[in-house]
């Protein structure tokens, strides 16, 4: 007579975990509180029921992708880490991300978590395999979707591997508890495994750091079918919207009116900004960090946005600023660019940045090529904590990206830590950092914030801007590679006029129609530009109302804008012409910028060669 064996083997438990992770990643629902139940039966069969929160059943392509993701995780033989930790610690770091719909009873004080990088973080009592390889092969046999409950039931078979010996009794590998950001990454991971095509898509294809509803936002590309949905971005990136309360608080703390970019929600999202304000009020001053990739001589108006805003922050908070010029990044990512050319462009771009009016006493501008030795120790410490799988997940790198690209994110992360500036910032290791940047740079800083706690360093705070729309209308950002899409800071008044007169408008075709229907000011480029550059709030409001109501014509709005932009470009050109090579060298000199050298006592020399 056959004895009944418990069908719940470590192999089957592990298989269930991987399937659950892949379902979350591909269909795009949170890992926490989404498992309704699971069951393992004889013959290596299992079933799992999850709440997808979606109105529709997953498509066949999505289900195929789930199977692919599962089998890929198995092929990689990923480690299945075990973490035992007090329940209250786990909850304070991960919320309820590790729970099923039904949580463990209240008396449970310690949790045993299973962690599989990029896929799973789950409170699991049953033993699992030490790594995914021995699971072998998973095939989905059946699925059912209950529309009214938004529940998906998936049945699958497992064929355990015969060539990888299964050592069920081996001690599971341990790891340092992953940070809270891991949960954000896991929840946003549908970005990495979007269902429409192969994973081998290169940066363009797989860098879907926020691929959702037809929009794609990565450090390399911004694409949307219509307008970029910023609230959706905030959700999928896990940042927070800047509320009116926060704007009011910034005004109170700085004792001055908020910059129009902040008042008007053009800087609209943040991470830990309120913490920066708390610390500031408690007397702990932060430093500002921003940057530019020097890929061309010509800056367009969109490039000035973060710098004008950063200048306001520097003045309002009276804090030092470091500006990174990533000549290394542009060399690595742009096949056509020569290294010497990138280095030269860094120097040229520094002039445009200086022309924005930064305080020479408290601003340090650096080219990565020149400054790397000072921050190399920090770069290395970051590199050691980030795997290829992670950068691939965050940035969409593939095997065919050069290894410089793969390693570069650590270089952009490093200036977030004050220890990268032993001389400029006097070597304090825990100076808080605030990074103003366009939202497309967020991927770098999600990674940075993920490694920070493991380096026992403070996470940088961020304040994100929307994109500056291109002349051709909504859905993209201004790009310097398309001459017609942008107004360059070097454009003559004639060119400015011509470009604005030819740009995309939300006004009606004819005067009669405009008077009848009014303009759609949400997509109207001239009006959008006014929201960026017209200082007078009342006047802007008046124009918006009149134009939308059809009492103002596109031509009149364009005329007002042309005047403002002509003055802006002229002012910039004059300011830039006044920047000498000498001045650039002094902004780029490695020197204390934190209180005119008064912190000299703190200066830590750069690490020995
Ligand atoms: N990668 C950015 C670019 O290509 C440049 C950059 C480096 C940056 N460090 C930064 C931008 C910090 C914003 C904040 O433009």
Image (tube, rainbow, N blue to C red):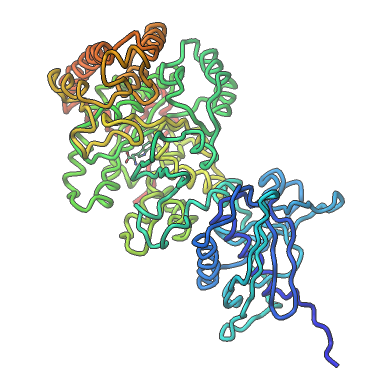
Query: Where residue 488 appears, x then y in whole percent?
Result: 20, 28
Q: Is 250 in front, or is 378?
A: 250
Q: Is residue 52 visible?
A: yes
Rendered residue at 23%/30% (across/down): 486
Rendered residue at 56%/51% (across/down): 28
The image quadrant of residue 118 is bottom right
The image quadrant of residue 111 is bottom right
Query: Where residue 133 appears, x then y in whole percent?
Result: 57, 75
Rendered residue at 65%/61% (across/down): 144
25 to the left or right of 441: right
Q: Is 320 in front, or is 262?
A: 262
**Which corner quadrant of the figure contains ligand 1?**
top left
Q: Is residue 535 visible?
A: no
Query: Where residue 445 appears, x then y in whole percent?
Result: 46, 42
Q: Is residue 416 above or below residue 537?
A: below
425 to the left or right of 118: left
């Amino acid at each position: 007579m056959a004895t009944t064996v418990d069908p719940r083997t470590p192999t089957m438990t592990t298989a269930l975990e991987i399937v659950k992770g892949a379902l979350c990643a591909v269909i795009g629902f949170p890992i926490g509180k989404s498992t309704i139940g699971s069951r393992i039966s004889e013959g290596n069969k299992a079933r799992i029921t999850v709440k997808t929160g979606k109105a529709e059943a997953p498509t066949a392509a999505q289900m195929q992708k789930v199977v692919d993701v599962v089998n890929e995780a198995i092929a990689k033989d990923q480690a299945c880490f075990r973490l035992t930790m007090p329940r209250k610690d786990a909850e304070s770091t991960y919320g309820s991300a590790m729970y099923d719909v039904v949580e463990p009873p209240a008396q449970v004080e310690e949790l045993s978590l299973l962690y599989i990088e990029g896929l799973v973080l789950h409170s699991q009592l049953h033993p699992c395999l030490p790594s995914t390889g021995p699971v072998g092969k998973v095939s989905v046999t059946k699925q059912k979707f209950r529309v009214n409950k938004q529940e998906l039931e998936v049945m699958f078979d497992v064929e355990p591997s015969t060539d990888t010996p299964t050592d069920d009794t081996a001690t599971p590998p341990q790891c340092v508890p992953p940070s809270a950001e891991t949960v954000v990454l896991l929840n946003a991971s549908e970005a990495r495994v979007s269902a429409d095509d192969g994973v081998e898509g290169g940066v363009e294809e797989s860098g879907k750091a926020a691929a959702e509803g037809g929009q794609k936002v990565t450090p390399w590309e911004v694409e949307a079918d219509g307008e970029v949905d910023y609230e959706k971005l905030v959700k999928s990136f896990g940042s927070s919207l800047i509320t009116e309360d926060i704007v009011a608080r910034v005004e109170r703390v700085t004792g001055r009116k908020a910059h129009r970019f902040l008042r008007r929600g053009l800087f609209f999202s943040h991470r830990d900004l309120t913490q920066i304000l708390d610390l500031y009020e408690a007397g702990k001053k932060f430093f500002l960090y921003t940057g530019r990739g020097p890929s061309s001589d010509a800056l367009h108006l969109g490039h000035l946005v973060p710098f004008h805003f950063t200048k306001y922050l520097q003045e309002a908070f009276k804090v030092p600023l470091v500006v990174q010029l990533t000549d290394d990044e542009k060399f690595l990512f742009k096949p056509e660019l020569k290294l010497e050319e990138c280095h030269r462009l860094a120097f040229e771009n520094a002039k445009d940045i200086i022309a924005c009016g930064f305080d020479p006493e408290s601003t340090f501008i650096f080219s990565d090529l020149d400054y790397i030795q000072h921050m190399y120790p920090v770069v290395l410490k970051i590199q050691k904590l980030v795997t290829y799988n992670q950068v691939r997940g965050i940035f969409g790198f593939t095997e065919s990206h050069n290894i410089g690209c793969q390693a570069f994110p650590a270089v952009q992360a490093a200036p977030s830590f004050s220890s990268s500036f032993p001389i400029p910032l006097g070597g304090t290791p825990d100076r808080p950092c605030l990074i103003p940047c366009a939202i497309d740079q967020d991927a770098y800083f999600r990674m940075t914030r993920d490694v920070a706690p493991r380096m026992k360093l403070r996470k940088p705070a961020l304040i994100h801007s929307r994109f500056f729309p291109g002349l051709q209308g909504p859905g993209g950002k201004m790009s310097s590679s398309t001459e017609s899409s942008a107004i360059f800071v070097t454009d003559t008044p004639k060119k400015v006029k011509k470009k604005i007169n030819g740009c995309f408008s939300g006004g009606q075709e004819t005067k009669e129609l405009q008077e009848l229907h009014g303009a759609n000011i949400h997509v109207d480029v001239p009006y959008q530009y006014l929201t960026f550059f017209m200082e007078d709030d009342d006047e802007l409001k008046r124009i918006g109302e009149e134009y939308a109501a059809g009492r103002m014509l596109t031509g009149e709005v364009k005329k007002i804008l042309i005047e403002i932009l002509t003055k802006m470009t002229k002012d910039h050109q004059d300011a830039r012409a006044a920047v000498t090579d000498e001045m650039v060298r002094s902004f780029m000199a490695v020197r204390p910028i934190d209180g005119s050298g008064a912190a000299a006592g703190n200066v830590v020399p750069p690490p020995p060669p």
